[in-house]
Image (cartoon, helix red, strand yellow):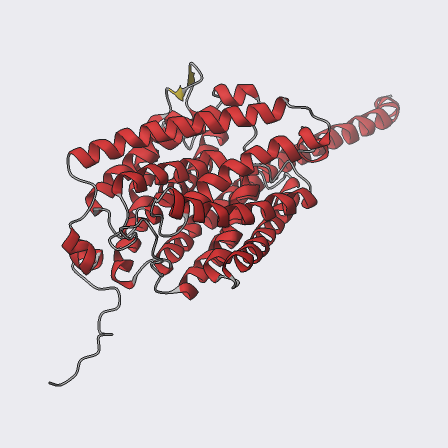
Amino acid sequence: MLRKILDKLKKPLLLAGVLIVGFSGVSFAQATTESNAVALDTVWTLLAAVLVFFMQAGFAMVETGFTRAKNACNIMMKNLMDFSIGSIGYWAIGFGVMFGASAFGLFGSDGFFLSAANTSTGDGQWQFAFWIFQAVFAATAATIVSGAMAERTKFTSYLIYSVFITAIIYPVVGHWIWGGGWLSEKGMIDFAGSTVVHSVGGWAALIGAMLLGPRLGKYNKDGSANAIAGHNIPLAGLGVFILWFGWFGFNAGSTTAGTDLSIAVIAVTTNLAAAAGAIMAMFTAWLRFGKPDTSMSLNGALAGLVAITAGCANVSPLSAIIIGGLGGIIVVLSVEFIDKVLKIDDPVGAVSVHGVCGAWGTLAVGLFAQEAYGGVNGLFFGGGMGQLVTQIIGIVAVFFWVSIAALIVFGLIKATVGLRVSKEEELKGLDIGEHGMESYSGFQIFTNQ
């Protein structure tokens, strides 16, 4: 009797067992897939952060190469301290200001000292990866200023400035656009930071260079400008290639998701814009100066990279070439205008590359964005004026905030500890005056007399 009952139940029990195992397998597979996705996103974000960190070396090489040998140690120290002080300032205050709970859409109000990160939950652990990626961006904004203020700034004064830009000035803009602030609510697009990072650094550099005044010997009594050649253009070239390399992490890494296949499109638009910027800067310099100027061509590549950073996920490859190419033209004209008309001494062209071309790239999103790439159409693709107007509002608002904030910070520094080294220190070089050493010790030529 029992055997007959078991025989009748065999098939239903077998079917039930198969279903249980099957559903368990599906649940396990789903959990595994989700776990793998989180791991991939985390690894990608950390890899991108490392690439962006390496850009610090690129900035250091570019700025050193474009300035004189007697100030190379000083440039190295400023780039080193930008990242070191910036990391601490951003950990303590900046990250909270940027991504904390929004207060009136203007700044974050919690999350200081990385308090939202912990090791007890997946989201808490993710915060560590997200923080390091954002920290290297903050350091990039800070180090842009170093080049424009090179060869005549007090080292102590520069350290004070580094705290303020990474803890307050940059994070406020970041909150507006990336942290849920008022510009984010208006729909402004700045995917990887043409404005958030580059224009912030560029406008701060403009104010700093204005308050410092030009280097000794830069301008004649009649107002004409003298070229002060950098001491190592190959070194500057190496820096540009390092920056180009790191920019793939800067732009594509801003997805913070290795599972987001748009990273491929972003890598392509980033590269094409840089190439177009270098080419068009070369031809523009060739036409204006009679020679394909190396320094202008190098800055052209950077101009293309800065210009595409805002719209790298929202424009087509062809549009990226146009945006980057125009950036290459703009940077040459801007360097001339700032140097010869405004008479602001910017040794490396930081204001033009990062401030002006950052603004151009942000504006370009309102013109060239396509729905097929980022879900929004710009003016040239039937989207009307709405996005363009939003981009302009963001550009203007950031310019005024950074200019006023930098004017206050640099003005207070100038009125207290002082902003500029003495004439004797500047002539001798900041390596000796500020750091007590030479970058190229032992290369002096002695003669027996």
Where residue 236 sits in the image (x, y, percent)? Answer: 42, 60
Where residue 373 sits in the image (x, y, percent)? Answer: 69, 36
Q: Is residue 51 left or right of residue 161?
A: right
Q: How many tags in the picture?
A: 0
**In the rendered image, the vertical position of residue 93 relative to residue 211, given as above or below:** above
Q: Is residue 257 left or right of residue 193?
A: right
Residue 322, picture quadrant:
top right
Residues 291 and 3: in front is 291
Does residue 393 appear anywhere in the picture? yes
**In the rendered image, the vertical position of residue 51 relative to residue 387, given as above or below:** below
Where residue 407 sits in the image (x, y, percent)? Answer: 29, 31
Residues 161 and 445: in front is 445
What residue do we see at 26% from left, 68% from top? 440
Residue 315, picture quadrant:
top right
In this view, the residue farthest toward the bottom is: 448
Residues 38 and 431: in front is 431
Quadrant into which the C terminus falls:
bottom left
Where residue 291 sits in the image (x, y, percent)? Answer: 51, 64
What residue do we see at 54% from left, 38% from top? 360
